[in-house]
Amino acid sequence: MSSSNILRRASYSLKPTSMIHRTPWRPPVAKSAQGIYIELEDGRQVIDAVGGASVACIGMSHPAVRQAIKDQVERLPYVYSMQLSNQPAEELADLLTESGNGAFELVGLVSGGSEAMEGVIKTARQYYHERDQPQRKNFISRKLSYHGNTVATLSLSYHPGRRAPYEAILNHDNFHHVSPAYAQRFQRSDETEEQYVERLKKELEDKFIELGPNTIIGFVAETVVGATTGAVPAPKGYFKAMKEVCHKYGALFILDEVMSGMGRMGTMHAWESFGDGEAPDIQAVAKGLGGGYASIGAVLISKEVAQGIRSKSGFWKHGHTYQSSPLACAASIAVQKVIAAENLLENCRNQGAYLASLLRSRLQGENSMASPYTFDIRGGGLFWGIEFDFDTPEAAGIDLKGEGFAMLVQARALEKGLVIMGFTGGSNLEGDKGSHILLSPAYNVTKEEIEKIVDVLVETIEEVLVQHR
Ligand code: PLP
């Protein structure tokens, strides 16, 4: 085993190699991959049921994308975007502005999700700066949210575990939080879905008034919550209601589709999957934009905001060295062409529905061992979350707390050859148990692969339950 001195995010020590890992354990080393199958250095093959972190949306090693990257690296790997534009970046921007039924007019291309959300924050502020409303300086986002790992995006996020070490240096003055939209946990038994949405709408409006409506830049939400709670879609009418509050007070309605967008929900933008289909004023996308072939993210800007920016300085003030990378953009275009040519959004919707039906029958069906502890199965497209609850009378004899269960399942599943994502920690909000598993395989996953994923997952869940009885 070779060691390396590449610095990664760490939570452990530098031993046994000099590589810092993002986990308390040393993960196995991946060697190569094809489709959803990853070969490890120890010779084992594992199935990736979560696309890394909901990234690998067409599987690995697709010949069309490999070819596009090779061609681009030979043609033009890099130019600096303050000096020169490039053809793949222009083409990708066109592709994105042609999506969403005319919702977007300008696109900023960056290197990933956090950078895109940082760009969203700065674009929104730039808009009001240019519109002579310098007093607008507050963002409102939600408890139970994750928007990235830079200081500003972590300030926007509400993920106590990820915030904790940095709390003292986060921005508490300009970033404020309201309740999440999480009906399964927080809708009261004495209210309808409509009344729940009304309550959340009132809370947002109250927050606007408390902070001063003309100090608000915008309200920011993940269209489908990912990293904190595992694929929780909002209740019907929620986004329409939130957008109404924003626009009533001249603020922006902003969506973070870093995880849920670019086809993950079975439509190109996740907001297109919902009945109220509310287009945002600004949106971030990443992950599926490059499908794991390139580090890329984008800020999508509506006509209104674009006009604001164009009206004065005329240029985007957010930018980094690798902005509009020709290589990343060429890879991204190739990924998007594969999705279109192979009709993968339809497969995503169909296989997603099949996955959900299997999960429900195997984990919530009458004879299922996991049924008493499976609190909720929710999602859409190929973005599904399973939430467990051990705070029930049925779980009295089980020596498990909700928080740890998903991580135990994740670790055992990997030993059995299945990569899934478990979440602990949640929000510390009362009622949020913080034990979720996320599944988000590639959009070209087959029916047989879905069956295999569910078989191994259910087997693993049952094994962990038996061990703790
Ligand atoms: N926003 C959301 C909704 C995310 O899920 C993530 C990452 O999981 C990010 C932003 C940050 O993206 P990245 O990890 O690419 O910086």
Image (spheres, helix red, strand yellow):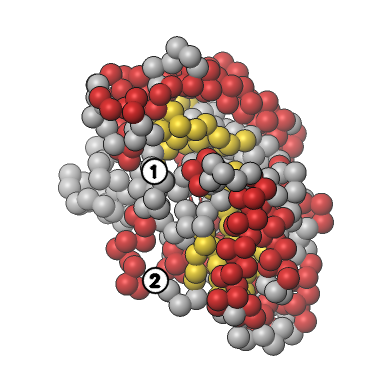
Disc 1 marks a residue whose amino acid type is Gly
Label at residue 170? 2
Q: Residue furthest left?
A: 15
Disc 2 marks a residue whose amino acid type is Leu
Q: CA distance from mark 1 to mark 2?
A: 23 Å
- How crowded pointer 2 is (Cα within 10 Å; few <14, some 14-19, many 20+) is rated as some
Q: Residue furthest top?
A: 367
- How crowded pointer 1 is (Cα within 10 Å; few <14, some 14-19, many 20+) is rated as many
Q: Nearer the viewer, residue 398 or 392?
A: 392
Which quadrant is home to the N terminus?
top left
| x 26%, y 41%: residue | 26
Label at residue 50? none
Q: Is residue 152 positioned above or below 28 on the image?
A: below
Res. 434 image quadrant = top left
First in sequence, mark 1 or 2: give its number.
2
Can the viewer see residue 444?
A: no
Q: Nearer the viewer, residue 369 or 14?
A: 369
Q: Nearer the viewer, residue 173 or 459?
A: 173
* Residue highlighted by disc 1: 434
Q: Secondary structure at mark 1?
A: loop
